[in-house]
Image (tube, rainbow, N blue to C red):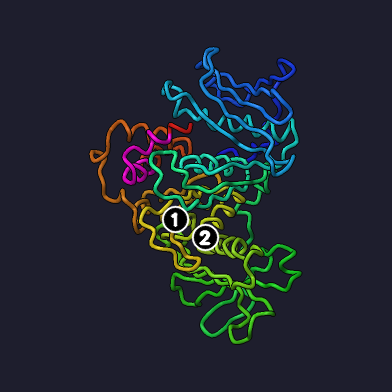
Amino acid sequence: MSDDLDKTIEKLGVGKQEAPHRFNYDHLLDPQHIAQGYSLRVTVPSEDDYVTHLYHNGQKVGKLESGRSPRGHETLMINDATIKPSEPDHRGKGLGVKMYEATYAHAKNKLGYTHVSGHLHSTLASRVHSSLAQKHGLMYEPEPSGISNAPGPYDNRMAPYRYELNEQDLTKAIKNLQPGKITSETGDSHIWDYNHLLPPHLKQAGYSMHIEEPKMEGGEYTVEVKHPSMSPAVDHIAGRLNLTHDANSRSITPEIADVHDAHRGAGLGTSMYEAAMAHGYHIHDARVVAGDKHSSSASAVHAKVSQKHGMGYQPKLNPKAPPKVGDYDAKYAPYSYAMKSDEFCKTFNDWLGKLEGGRAEGMPDKEFDSGQLEEGTQHEMEHTNDPKIARGISKDHLAEDPKYYTKLKQIE
């Protein structure tokens, strides 16, 4: 989750030119990086290739190679990113992210690239792309590659990717999405009109959206999208999202989401989730979205909504995914993220680890390697100002993989 959502790629600026093909990007480094002797340069040896180098006290310690993609002049291809394995002191400081930021800034602001793409990449690399996308309003959507038996941190479990370098509307946080209004009643339920959250092209195409919620508080509500092409026998419903909400944890949980085959690909899933979150945030004072194992298509929707509204969804593969049944492959593990872009919910620890499959529930600190736990807590402080929250996140990761932060260093 980003605390600096206004810092889009465009606002990162262009490095100062030091030589005909060399640009200084030290302005993107944090003050502590500069104090520790780091510097950042982008070199453009040819029209179609360039390299971002990370230096420490004048010595090269990191490199990110990129070049023009065969897909077209507007697409930058990421070829390789490394920080020297023989120099472990340079890892775990966020320097890998800085190399990507310099690369993206130069690509968009100096060379005119509009998209970035890459090959098969690891689960850890996918997390870095997700962090960059959430910080800068990009639309990276991770998809499994189908490769599940590759060893080590470079597991190639994520498919090739492509996303825009143009920033999205990051001012449209969930708290700024207006709630619907009760427009009618049906039996024991209120009907809330949420047509205002449908994009204009969907409204013009005849779609409508509402939320149905029992008059008596029951802890659940349903988002429905209707279209005239659907049969009256199904009440013209083209898409539906069922949710529950919990006042104690201030959370909403998507239960079942479905869009009719004839209406997929139109963006209905994103609109339904936006309505569900706006309703949960404003009507039920919810601040967290938490759910169970979910599919690749559901993960893509969460990633898109999260990146659009500055939230912190982090996809994690489900190591015990059953065989795929239709579109519901259960490839992704349980998740939880805050609906506010500027803070985690204070009740984080009340629900952290309570999700089905959560491995840190009830585990004291002594059950974790003390070095890994301290390292993980320090790393997670990049995402929150609360040490207790950071420690809770760290424990959840280490319960899943005792060497999680050691592996994470290898791509930073």
46 and 354: which is toward the camera: 46
Q: Position of residue 17 (x, y in %)?
A: 72, 19
The residue labelled by disc 2 is 298
Residue type highlighted by circle 2: Ala
| Residue holding disc 1 | 332
Nearer-the-camera pick, 191 or 84: 84
Tell me where the magenta segment starts and ends, as one range: 393-408
Res 231 quadrant in image: bottom right
Tell me the element at label 2.
Answer: helix
The residue positioned 47% from the left and 71% from the top of the image is 220
Tell whether label 2 touches label 1 (CB within 8 Å). Answer: yes
Determine the image quadrant of residue 100: top right
**Badge 1 or badge 2: first in the primary sequence:** 2
Q: CA distance from mark 1 to mark 2?
A: 9 Å
Residue drawn 62% across and 51% down? 308
Question: Residue 285: image x %, image y %?
Answer: 50, 59
Residue kind at label 1, given as amino acid type = Tyr
* In the depicted structure, whether residue 203 falls above or below residue 76: below
Residue 212: image x %, image y %? 55, 75
Element carrying mark 1: loop
Image: 242 above or below 229? above
Q: In the depicted view, which residue is nearer to us: 246 or 301? A: 301
Q: Name the residue rendered at 55%, 64% in the picture.
A: 276
